[in-house]
Image (spheres, rainbow, N blue to C red):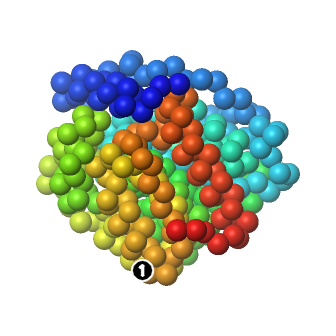
Amino acid sequence: MTDTATMQQELAARMSAAFASGDAVRVRASLKASRRPAIPVPVDRVEDRTIGESGVGVRIYHPAAAGRSGSGLPALVYFHGGGFVLCDLDSHDSCCRRLANGIGAVVVSVDYRLAPEFPFPAAVDDAWTATEWVAAHIDELGGDPTQLVVAGDSAGGNLAAVVAMMARDRGGPPIAFQVLIYPVVDQRRKSSLDSPHTASGVLTAAHMQWFTEQYLGADGDRTNVLASPILGDFNGLPPAHVVTGELDPLCEEGEEFAARLRAAGVPATVRRYERGFHGFFNLADHLPAAQQATDDVCAVVRSALRGESPCS
């Protein structure tokens, strides 16, 4: 295991080196090549499939026997982070395995199309396709239709929040809970660009502007609710848990999103992790704080699906 400060410095150095070219394909390749190897996390079984007319890739994780509670398991649709430009099923494989075992859920990780090759709203379309598919095939997956959860980190947190809004507006599928891990919810970047933590190097102001331009285009509409869900209607949304990090430039907008949910009468909890930087949650193989955050998320989801009242 590595201490938080060392890991933050390492990740900042990797990001700086990767972004030297500014080309999305090269940035992707550089970061993929510099990934630390994941520690194997056994689950019952894993299956890769291609779904929907557009051919969205998904990876389905069935929890290890110790994490099961019988048939009709919760089903969690997971959207990986990476600014809508980076990462893939492999980058978040360990994360999804831990969530499957920790919650005792079938986890479906979504390989949505990435910008700039596939700009907004391609990722939203793929996220919606995957969520509809999981809901339609919930019996086949061994899931409980009343326990459908959407979750994601960073850009994936954005997609989870957007899918929850779309499901409400389109009359289903019913989402029981949403987990938003340091989500990107405001493409205007109002609070994040003003954050003192943009100098950390892990997620700088320049990085955030670059991600938004890759996703929306230089002249894209940053106020579109499907890109900036913080500008949407919060009434009638599913309960939520929001994870933030003390040193993350996205900390304030994530916590503001939770506050707006609560103001609309939606149960929403927030857990801010001391010394947590952007991307820390996906490092449970190497960072004790990330393992703790994962354990906490699993406990929150289990409690919520049992109908227990959340604590703020």
Nearest to the observer: residue 101 or residue 252: 252
Q: How many marks are shown on the rendered structure?
A: 1
Q: Mark 1, residues whose alpha carbon is within 10 Å: few (<14), some, or many (≥20)?
A: few
x, y (%) of residue 184? Answer: 34, 54
Residue at 33% x, 47% y is 248
Residue ranking furthest to the right? 70
Residue 208 appears in the rendering = no
- Determine whether 93 is above or below 236 in the image: above
Residue at 59% x, 64% y is 177
- Determine whether 189 is above or below 309 in the image: above
Q: Is residue 78 left or right of residue 221?
A: right
Picture quadrant of residue 85? top left
Nearest to the observer: residue 262 or residue 60: 262
- Determine whether 271 is above or below 260 in the image: above
Residue at 31% x, 71% y is 231
x, y (%) of residue 266? Answer: 51, 76
Residue at 43% x, 67% y is 258
The residue indicated by pointer 1 is 263
Nearest to the observer: residue 309 or residue 23: 309
Q: Is residue 83 left or right of residue 236?
A: left
x, y (%) of residue 303? Answer: 68, 62
Residue ranking furthest to the left? 219
Residue 287 appears in the rendering = yes
Say which amino acid is labelled 1: Ala
Q: Is residue 256 left or right of residue 297?
A: left
- Where disc 1 sits, the SS reads helix
Nearest to the observer: residue 239 or residue 172: 239
x, y (%) of residue 204? Answer: 22, 40
